[in-house]
Amino acid sequence: MDISSTRLRENLELFSFPRLSGTEFEKRAFNLAKQKIEGLDLTPEVQTFKFSTFYSRIYPKISFPLVFWIFLTLYLNLNLPFLFVSLILSFSIFFPFFLLTRKPEKIKLGKVLESQNLYVKLSTDSNLAPNEIHDIFFMAHLDSKGQRITARTRGISIFLLTISILSNIIILILRGWLSSLYVFFTALGGFPLLILLIAVIILSTNTTNNKSKGVIDNASGIACVLELLYAFTAKKGIQKNYNLWFVLTGAEESGTMGVRFFYKLIKDIKRDKAIIHNFESLGKSINIIVTKSTLDNHPSYYEFIGKKAEDNNYTLFVNPLSRGIHTDGMYLTQHNFTLFEYESSEVGKYMHSEKDSLENVDTDMLQELCNFIYSNIISYFS
């Protein structure tokens, strides 16, 4: 087998340094990865793009406080003119930004930076199978980021934010419907309103820095993509009836900007004949996330991988959500691509912090995962 734990460890260490998107540090990671690919006598393609940090760093600081203010205004219900003016002002600020951020790659507000995607395509020498998979993608992002608040704390805060918003909506509806219990529902709403305030304070005061080495997120993914590239180029003739794409995106941590631009290159690919393998934050366990499009597009391949995952004691589950989850794989899922995303469940307390370091990633586990993916592709198509 051509998968090497030693080589995985070397690449994990090589990319273990802060590499905030749009900085010279991300460019250094890009150059290192490019050299690695060129060392295999391959010529990678480069897609350079510009992006704004408004969507990932400024927009949350505007939208979250506005949401709280809207609910506070509704609860206070001081008088009709105040309520009317407050809501009109709030929505007149919120909705233009909301509409603008539906296509964040087009935003030019705030600081505009440059990044790049790096990819290489191994085209098959054989004819593509008419009823099978034509394109297989292996993807990871090059950049990392540090933040004042860990990913786990942010995740909990977003969950509480969502629950409190839903609770507030229900309570306000009941208060308007059962006017005789107006005081009761106003008092009851104080608790979810307080939870909303705490979540908003946490999320809107979070700041981004370049202090995380990004080993889990996402040097682990970079190492896996490069290792699979090595494995598939090591033996001639092993690739049958399908194209292989190895993709390293930039600026994922700034609102999945890299994959948004890369999508423009592959938007004409047949979705029912493509599979995305995305590596996102691997530590010491393996979860395989798929979405409904995976089941719809490739039920036989899903069943095949599901059985193999069970044999390896990997956790495979169908995520019903594709919105609100910012990974390269989930972005492509929104465009109906078939996704297998590999991640670890225990890493949230380390991600985006200075604790995201080498001791939290098991390279033997990465080797096992790469073997799993490599051997299953060879087996399925043979």
Image (cartoon, rainbow, N blue to C red):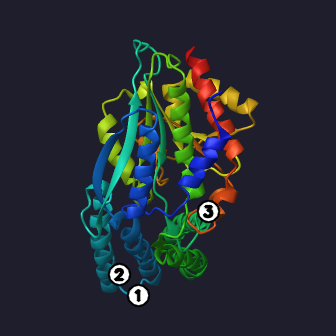
Label pair 2/1, CB-CB below 8 angstroms: yes
Q: Please tell me which of labels 3 and 1 falls first in the chain.
A: 1
**Residue 363 visible here:** yes
Element on which disc 2 rests: helix
In the picture, measured across the screen, residue 328 lies left or right of residue 4, that is left
Q: Is residue 242 above or below residue 295?
A: above
Q: Which residue is mark 3?
A: 356
Residue 193: image x %, image y %? 54, 77
Q: Please tell me which of labels 2 and 1 falls first in the chain.
A: 1
| Residue 265, image quadrant | top left
Q: Marks 2/1: CA distance?
A: 7 Å
Q: Is residue 229 above or below residue 284?
A: above
Residue 138: image x %, image y %? 49, 37
Q: Which residue is mark 1?
A: 78
Nearest to viewer (mark 3 / mark 2)? 3
Q: Quadrant of the N terminus?
A: top right
Type of amino acid at the residue the image marks with label 3: Asp
Type of amino acid at the residue the image marks with label 1: Leu
Element on which disc 1 rests: loop
Residue 357: image x %, image y %? 63, 61
**Viewer-proximal residue among 180 and 143:** 143
Residue 268: image x %, image y %? 30, 31
**Viewer-proximal residue among 214 and 233:** 233
* Residue drawn at (61%, 44%) of the image: 8
Q: Which residue is mark 2?
A: 83
Q: Dot 3: within a 10 Å radius of its alpha carbon, few (fewer than 14), some, or many (20 or more) residues?
A: many
**Viewer-proximal residue among 206 and 43:** 43
Label pair 3/2, CB-CB below 8 angstroms: no
